[in-house]
Amino acid sequence: MKRLPIILGVVVVAVFVLVNSIFIVDERQQALKLQFGQVVGQTEGYREPGLYFKIPLIQTVVFYEDRILPLEGGELEVTPIDDRRLVVDAFARWRITDPVRFRQAVTSELNALPRLERILNASLREVLGSVTSDTILSDERSELMTRIRDTTRAQSQNLGVQIVDVRLRRVDLPQQNLQATFERMQAEREREAADERARGEEAAQRIRANADRQAIELVSEARREAEVIRGEADGERNRIYASAYGRDEEFFSFYRSLTAYERALQGSNSSIVLTPDSEFFQYFGEGRLNAAAAEAAAASGAGAEEAGAQETGAEASEATAPSGQAAPGAAPAGEAAPTTPAPAAD
């Protein structure tokens, strides 16, 4: 019975030593074994889940998260190269990749957040300050976020952490500069519209000038062809007139006079003041018309007599009349041959 307390004390001490000699690392954690503040054991830390041992009361164990951790950045005002200030709200995701360096640099996760936030803000100002605001608000934002992630990752490697991803949650204009920004955007759009209108007017004038030049060329060519055709037609007309005039000059003159009467005497009140012996009225009076008809009849009668004389001469050559007698139809000697009176002119 006297040994029972001793045995119980030994058991308690053994249990205490055993409990303080082991530590468990699960899949969500990574650990460092410290001895008087120095890392011992696995120098890269215990990152594989399992059961590990340590020296009680001399060695201690610190645990760090092995999962991806959040980094919520506040609203940050950046100025792109076009001097249009923007308010950016970004966040990042990070994880501890080197627990030894992480402990040496920041000691704990709580101390790492301010430093990571400063690195993230510096990267946002560096990358977004090198582009225009239109680029930030366009489809190129994903490329900008990749650049920010790479810049932040490079600056945070000495902390023993890795920046997994960086995202821009919101990009907006400052409230105090919203109206001025809208007015400047409107002025820029009006300037661009004026430039577009000026270029359009220039193109329109160029098209009009080209069209006018082509129209002048087409009209000139058409006029030239028309003048050629008109000249050929006038030549053909003059040839026809000359041929007709050569056949019967009197009829041609008569026809031209009738055409002149038709063109000059139009309407119900046409009147012309000329002298009676004017050449314009040479076929207009009754006497002139009768004289013209008589001349035409005389010309036709003379032609008939000439034809009859030629026929009589031909018959005389075939048959000879008796001596001292006249041929049948011939006039007696010493008498004139009867002549047929010309018809009276109407």
Image: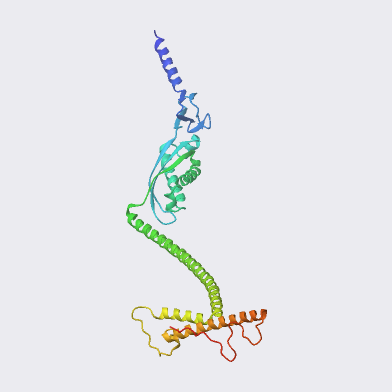
Vertical comparison of 239 with 44: above or below = below
Image point 48% across, 81% down: which residue? 254
Image label count: 0
* Quadrant placement of the N terminus: top left
Vertical comparison of 72 with 326: above or below = above
* Residue ranking furthest to the bottom: 334
| Residue 154 % position (x, y) | 51, 44
Vertical comparison of 255 with 23: above or below = below
| Residue 136 % position (x, y) | 43, 50
Image point 36% across, 58% down: which residue? 186
Colour theme: rainbow
Between 106 and 35, the one lying in front of the other is: 106
| Residue 53 % position (x, y) | 49, 23
Vertical comparison of 213 with 123: above or below = below
**Left or right of residue 338, residue 83 in this image:** left
> Can residue 262 be spotted in the picture?
yes
| Residue 250 % position (x, y) | 51, 82
> Can residue 285 be spotted in the picture?
no
Between 48 and 259, the one lying in front of the other is: 259
* Quadrant placement of the C terminus: bottom left
Image point 47% across, 63% down: which residue? 203
**Quarter of the image where one finds residue 302:** bottom right
